[in-house]
Amino acid sequence: MIAPLSLSNVLTVMIAVACLTTLAPQSRGDAIRLWRLAVPASLAAAQALILLAAVFDATFVHDAEWLIGGAVGSLIGRARGWAMPVAVDQTRSLVRLHRNFDAQLAAVGLVACAFIDFTGAALEDAVLPCEHTAALAALFAGYIVCRSLAIGLRATRAPNLESIEVQ
């Protein structure tokens, strides 16, 4: 069962696209303020929670699937966040990551989940069951959130070894 097209479907697409665009400076290797690590992570978490709320006939199995998806994504994101090389400027609260596209791919997955939900609501027939779409979004969101948390923790605990030039 799927709800007809509503504002929440449009909102999930907008949040997913905003998450994708706010991750772009990290992927390019630009110097970013430390607080900007939290923006795409919070957008990803919000999108996953909205898709979870869209599941009508929620059962214990559906909730467990969502939690397992989020946990697996979190573990992989945490491992990636701790393994990435990071340059930190503590005096100006700047972080620079090497060029990478892992978070961009996860954000593209969030956009795909949002479009699957949007398309199913527009057609009033689910392309992929809502509970699976929500679990997949939880996987991607967990990856983005825990990757950002790990990078943020490393950045706050790292010694100030270099001064990052902002271009």
Image (spheres, rainbow, N blue to C red):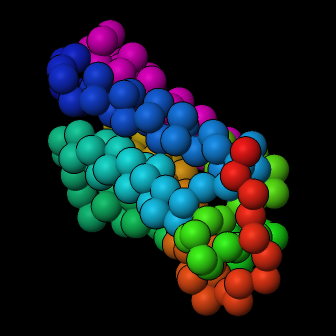
Quadrant assignment, res 50: top left
The image position of residue 122, as x and y in percent, is 30, 12
Q: Residue shown at 57%/83% (left/top)? A: 156
Q: Main secondary structure of the magenta part?
A: helix
Q: Residue shown at 79%/76% (left/top)? A: 162
Which quarter of the figure is the N terminus placed in? top left
The image position of residue 107, as x and y in percent, is 57, 42
Report whether 102 appears left or right of 132: right
Which quarter of the figure is the C terminus placed in? top right
Quadrant assignment, res 76: bottom right
Looking at the picture, does residue 46 appear above or below residue 63?
above
The image position of residue 21, as x and y in percent, is 54, 34
Q: Is residue 38 magenta?
A: no
Which residue is at the front of the view, 167 or 84?
167
Q: Residue shown at 71%/84% (left/top)? A: 160
Q: Residue shown at 58%/45% (left/top)? A: 23
Report whether 156 appears left or right of 38: right
Q: Is residue 124 magenta?
A: yes
Residue 87 visible (yes or no): yes
The image position of residue 136, as x and y in percent, is 50, 47
Report whether 47 appears left or right of 158: left
Quadrant assignment, res 114: top left
Q: Which residues are magenta?
A: 105-127
Residue 72 visible (yes or no): no
Which residue is at the front of the view, 99 or 87?
87
